[in-house]
Image: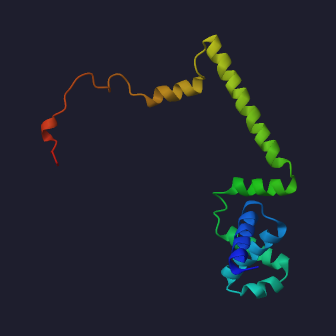
Amino acid sequence: MIFEELMQYCRIRAIENTLMPTEESTYRSLCREYSQKFHVSLPQVYLLDPEHVMGEVFEAQLEEIDIEGNLEAILDQIYTLEDPEYQSEKEKELEDFIEMAEAEEEERIKQGKPIHKAIKKALLETTLPPEVVPTRGSVNFGELKNES
């Protein structure tokens, strides 16, 4: 195999491992991250216990995350690890909720009912009262400078 063919093959494998990672390619990625993070040569990292390598990398990643700000995402990861069906069930639950809300809104519109009281109240609070809205007046364009 000539050098150019070898380069092309390695590029294709890198793209394939990025798009469809295998257990081996994922572990190599973790080893590279460990090597960079802890300044250990990559051949030495390959000799370490895989559990140690993965544990250190994952702990280092979590140290960089704002736990309180990302609590829901972290809990989702934990629930997904506990139950492989969790993510699909969560997506299905969200779809069902959206369908139900859309159906209720369509029914409300058909019946000619006003929007929900809480939303109506919030909308009324955000609009200006009639006495605050100007009914007449002018703008003095003479004060504007022509910068061209």
Q: Residue furthest front?
A: 2
Seen in the picture, residue 32 relative to 43 is either above or below; the reply is: above
Judged left or right of residue 96, residue 136 is: left
Q: Residue at x 86, y 48 (%)?
A: 85
- Say how the picture is coloured: rainbow
Name, please, the residue furthest toward the left: 142
- Front-most of residues 117 and 39: 39
* Closer to the camera in the image, 47 or 95: 47
Q: Residue 88, position in %: x, y?
A: 81, 45
In the shown orientation, is residue 127 left or right of residue 5?
Answer: left
Which image quadrant for residue 6? Answer: bottom right
Q: In screen coordinates, is 102 left or right of 115?
A: right
145 lies above or below 45: above
Residue at screen point 70% across, 80% down: 3
Q: Measured from the top left, where is residue 29 in percent x and y?
A: 74, 72
Q: Residue at x 80, y 72 (%)?
A: 27
Q: Is residue 121 above or below residue 79?
A: above
| Above or below, comparing residue 17 to residue 93 in the picture | below
All told, the count of numbered labels is 0
Splitting the image into 4 quarters, where does residue 107 fall? top right
**Front in this rendered view, residue 3 or 108:** 3
Using the rendered view, name the quadrant where residue 109 is placed. Answer: top right
Query: Is residue 21 among what the camera can see?
Result: yes
Residue 133 relative to residue 98: left or right: left
Q: Quadrant of the N terminus?
A: bottom right
Q: Position of residue 61 (x, y in %)?
A: 69, 70
The residue located at (64%, 13%) in the rendering is 110
For the question of whether residue 59 can be seen, the reply is no
